[in-house]
């Protein structure tokens, strides 16, 4: 086999392997945690004009724009990345008004009652959690703004109540474990269906 | 030796007759505790003052009396120094942070010592914006009015300092304002803490660290790291805001108890020891002193020689203002 043919074949192989992984994901899209008050998925993807203003105004930088690996339909729409910052709609600088909803020009994100907020829920990986591994860390419990979302076993190990958790991501952002023991999921989210 | 301690005891008792600087406030020494006979020649001792107030006594009178009992602010703080005031403004909820009025009272007292500058510095808990925390808790407005500059320490560059006595870590990054301050006044609120049992003076010093270091402390050994930090970044003066204490759970979401109490000392370990005991008493814990003995970061700090955690070697001067 000539060097040139080998490289060609190798290139095709790499492309097939990577596409076979990415393609279904691009078409189906990932389950994304959306900003507070974002319309239901299909409506959001249709109404959002990908102007990025919500991401620019978010005071914590929690809103980022979905990339191609998040899905083709979702590309450019806002999602919450709790590793960048928590959503402060439930507590903090957006308590009065959600800044993302305020600035959205197409009402893809609506102003919803912060007491009815449910963006998703935090999920714990106990194998990574320092408290579950016997260390003295309860940062998630310290920073959680929603009473009852996290409770403690023996005053030492946190358990998460997905039905009470609103998915603000404050605990995910603050988790000091490496790699992080907490992640945010849209599980249980409640979103308005239309403007 | 015992003669010396008897003399000191008399000194303490002599403060019973002290002066009242306003006509409406009278001071009564309700209790002095000292264990002169048990103090060996090589042992260190510490003094902690506790000033309680009747409900109508405000924070300025409590703070003034506490600092006066420690020797007076003009003697404590060298003239012309750069003072860092470190309250706890880690969160957005008022119950979880130091009362701005207590902080302002300390700032007003400190000004009498004519320092070069007084900076109130904080870096809030990870994920909490310090500027927003200073604003929503009223700390910014109240402390500025009292004459201090306010500094979101996260805007500072970090300076690496060695911890020669450190057992868990050998160096730590601290913020430049903290590094450049020659006199540190630590003003924590008396609170419970889920991971360290209490958060008072020693734990409050974590607010002088960048977020990366706060994370590392949890990964390595939180209690030992807190002790290691205080071995170098040691507050010169501590004034604990126990006007309202957070009991049962913390550092957020606990039950608030009105104590109208200010605890002050030059020894952060002794102050934590006395204050933690008060917190447990307020909760009705059966053996408050024993419970303090199980607070790891306080004991680790004493082991490093940062201060005194043995209650029998702490002189507590308790005063009530009415």
Image (cartoon, rainbow, N blue to C red):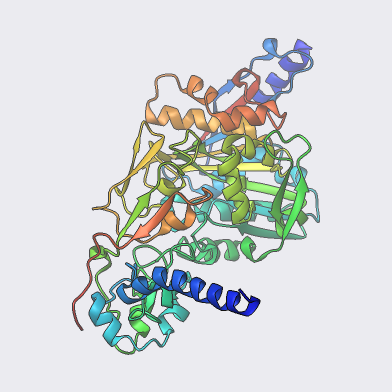
Q: Quadrant of the N terminus of chain A?
A: bottom right
Q: Nearer the viewer, residue B67 or B265?
A: B265
Name the image quarter holding the C terminus of chain A: bottom left
Q: Is residue B34 left or right of residue B25?
A: right
- Percent position (x, y) of residue B160? 75, 52
Splitting the image into 4 quarters, where does residue B159 fall? Answer: bottom right
Compared to residue A56, the image places residue B111 above or below, namely above
Q: Is residue A51 visible?
A: yes
Residue visible at 41% across and 80% down in the picture: A54
**Where is residue B94 drawn, in percent x and y?**
43, 55
**Residue A71 falls in image quadrant:** bottom left
* Number of on-image labels: 0
With respect to residue B295, does B183 lie above or below? Answer: below
From this viewpoint, which residue is outermost toward the front? Answer: A1
Q: Residue at x 34, y 69 (%)?
A: A30
Q: On screen, B34 above or below A21?
A: above
| Residue B49 appears in the figure | no
State left or right for residue A91 relative to residue B207.
left
* Residue B134 in the image, given as x and y percentages of width and height: 52, 62
Q: Nearer the viewer, residue B215 or A99?
A: B215
Q: Answer with left or right where residue B251 lies relative to residue B20.
A: left
The foreground one among A61 and B245 is A61
Image height check: is B78 above or below B26? below
């Amino acid at each position: 086999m000539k060097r040139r043919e080998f490289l060609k074949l190798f290139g095709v192989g790499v492309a097939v392997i990577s596409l076979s992984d990415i393609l279904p994901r691009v078409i189906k899209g990932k389950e994304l945690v959306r900003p507070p008050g974002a319309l239901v998925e299909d409506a959001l993807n249709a109404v959002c004009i990908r102007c990025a203003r919500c991401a620019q105004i978010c005071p914590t930088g929690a809103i980022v724009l979905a990339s191609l690996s998040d899905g083709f339909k979702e590309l450019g729409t806002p999602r919450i990345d709790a590793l960048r910052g928590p959503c402060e709609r439930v507590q903090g600088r957006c308590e009065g008004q959600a800044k993302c909803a305020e600035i959205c020009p197409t009402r893809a994100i609506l102003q919803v009652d912060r007491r009815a907020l449910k963006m998703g829920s935090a999920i714990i990986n106990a194998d990574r959690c320092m408290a579950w591994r016997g260390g003295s860390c309860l940062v998630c419990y310290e920073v959680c703004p929603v009473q009852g979302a996290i409770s403690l076993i023996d005053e030492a190990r946190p358990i998460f109540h997905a039905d009470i958790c609103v998915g603000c991501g404050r605990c995910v952002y603050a988790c000091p474990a490496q790699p992080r023991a907490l992640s945010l999921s849209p599980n249980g989210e409640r979103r308005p269906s239309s403007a | 030796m015992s003669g010396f301690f008897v003399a000191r005891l008399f000194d303490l008792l002599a403060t019973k007759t002290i002066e009242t600087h306003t006509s409406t406030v009278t001071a009564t020494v309700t209790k002095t505790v000292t264990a002169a006979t048990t103090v060996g020649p090589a042992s260190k001792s510490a003094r902690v003052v506790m000033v309680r107030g009747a409900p109508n006594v405000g924070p300025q009178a409590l703070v003034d009396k506490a600092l006066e009992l420690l020797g007076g602010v003009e003697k404590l703080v060298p003239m012309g120094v750069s003072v860092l005031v470190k309250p706890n403004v880690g969160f957005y909820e008022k119950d979880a942070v130091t009362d701005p009025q207590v902080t302002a009272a300390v700032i007003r007292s400190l000004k009498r010592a004519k320092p070069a500058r007084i900076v109130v510095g904080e870096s809030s808990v990870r994920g909490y914006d310090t500027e927003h925390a200073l604003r929503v808790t009223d700390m910014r407005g109240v402390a500025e009015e009292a004459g201090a500059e306010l500094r979101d320490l996260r805007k500072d560059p970090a300076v690496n300092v060695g911890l020669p006595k450190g057992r868990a870590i050998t160096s730590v990054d601290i913020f430049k304002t903290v590094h450049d301050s020659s006199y540190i006044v630590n003003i924590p609120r008396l609170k419970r803490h889920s991971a360290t049992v209490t958060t008072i003076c020693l734990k409050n010093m974590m607010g002088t660290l960048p977020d990366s270091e706060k994370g590392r402390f949890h990964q390595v050994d939180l209690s030992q790291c807190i002790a290691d930090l205080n071995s170098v970044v040691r507050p010169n003066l501590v004034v604990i805001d126990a006007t309202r204490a957070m009991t049962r759970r913390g550092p957020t979401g606990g039950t608030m108890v009105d104590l109208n109490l200010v605890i002050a000392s030059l020894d952060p370990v002794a102050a934590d020891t006395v204050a933690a005991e008060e917190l447990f008493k307020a909760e009705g814990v059966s053996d408050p002193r024993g419970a303090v003995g199980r607070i790891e970061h306080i004991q680790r700090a004493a082991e490093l020689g940062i201060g005194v955690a043995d209650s029998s070697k702490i002189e507590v001067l308790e005063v009530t203002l009415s």
